[in-house]
Image (spheres, rainbow, N blue to C red):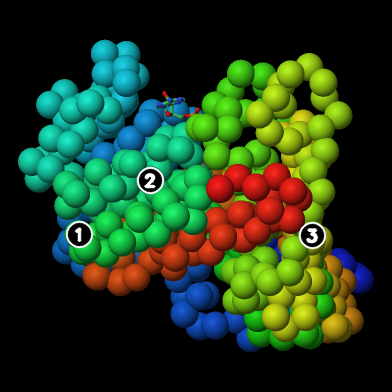
Amino acid sequence: MHTITPKNPIQRLEIGSASNPTGSMNRRQFAGLSASALAWSCLPACAQTFGSAQPVTFAAIGLGSISDIFMRACANSQKAKVTALVTGHPDTKGAKYSAMYGVPKTSIYTYETFDRILDNKSVDAVYIGLPNSMHCEYTLRAAKAGKHVLCEKPMANSGAECHQMIDACSQANVKLMIGYRVHYDPTWIQIVETIRSGKIGQIQSFHGGYFGQQPAGVWRLNKKLGGGGALVDVGIYPLNAIRHITGEEPQDFTAVISTRDRSGRFAEMEQSMEWTMKFPSGIIASCGCSYGQRGPSTLSINGETGYLVVEPAFNYEGLRWHGEIDGQQVEQSSSGKHPFQFTFEADHFADCVRNNKEPESPGEEGLKDMLAIEAIYEAAGAPIA
Ligand code: NAD
């Protein structure tokens, strides 16, 4: 455990990593954290017992940036292991990752030969790190092959596709989980528990955003492959976090989109979006996202008696939050080292597969985000489905 070093009036704390996910949990304001969440988040991933079970074995589909991270995360895990690869470039990318992770050449598939994975007994599950428009197809094909599915966010390009994916996995009796890091990062688990335990009083409002730049020509700016604009890719982070914290589904939406860049980069989708959501309890949320702005990933939560500001909120590491709890200023940061969030995520999924448990972020979670995304685009006058 880290020592708490009070720094009047601000108190600094650190929370940790997969290799050392400590937390200064004896703080009065965190007294209400659930025992289970703490017990889980305080254990190093590698130290969490997995009984005598073998690691859950994955085929990584699409060997781009996120799959590279996922494979590194699995290398840090005792519960998850990459044993197969699916790529359009078996002789280059396939060979590279096969050498890095000891994947046999016979377990390298192309998109065309992927369905043969049915016969590969050394693969329990797939990790889908493909462009958004391909998530549905590969989930259906994996389910047909009897493989569990850990699929990246956004779950798909439409609510209708999400329903197909949920049905296919249910019928094949395989697990389906969507890769929402916020649900598994110890810092976020602590933040969510802090809010839910009433430490800032009744939640009143959220202000969130995720902003960045995408260069011309990437698949994310292609409507068919991306499905939507920044909202489906980065705006989904504050959307999902807010839904997760409140446990409610947004009802009323307003939204505006704007494109100032006239270079043609945004020929198929908006550059920026701002939207509001109102929840059944009366909580209101105001969020923004962009593919053509520099800006932070951020989420502020205003309660009746206190508030929290998380910034950066959705990065892979270095999360920080400050605010006011019980009249005291608090400030806290995560010392977890990338790719620890993905190791927690992979470990959770492996536990679900081995112990027949429902994932914390199942397909239904991806579907609910997608329905909200469709409603937000509708409110902006730019429907995607
Ligand atoms: P990427 O471009 O780096 O990788 C995509 C992979 O898909 C590449 O290996 C590419 O060769 C392959 N591919 C197959 N068919 C393709 C096609 N028709 N067009 C383009 N690529 C094709 O993308 P990425 O950043 O790894 O994103 C992949 C998925 O992961 C997306 O759904 C994205 O939203 C998600 N993602 C999640 C996180 C997270 O933190 N959870 C972060 C980044 C990306």
Q: Are marks 2 and 3 in contact (CB under 8 Å)?
A: no
Q: CA distance from mark 2 to mark 3?
A: 28 Å
Calculate the distance from the C-alpha at mark 2 to the C-alpha at mark 1: 15 Å
Label for residue 254?
A: 3
Position of residue 139 relative to residue 105, above or below, is below
Q: Which residue is mark 1?
A: 172
Q: Amino acid at mark 1?
A: Ala
Q: Above or below — where is 121 with respect to 313?
A: above
Asked whether the viewer can see residue 269, the reply is yes
The residue that disc 2 covers is 136
Q: Where is residue 59 drawn, in percent x and y?
A: 26, 39
The alpha-carbon separation of the residues under discs 3 and 1 comes to: 39 Å
Callout 3 environment at 10 Å: few (<14), some (14 to 19), or many (20+)?
A: some
How packed mark 1 is, by other alpha carbons closer than 10 Å (few <14, some 14-19, many 20 or more), is some
Q: Amino acid at mark 3?
A: Thr
Q: Pick whichever, 284 or 159, lies toward us.
A: 159
> Nearer the N terminus, badge 3 or badge 1?
1
Identified at 55% across, 56% down, the residue is 370
Left or right: 346, with 282 as reference point: left
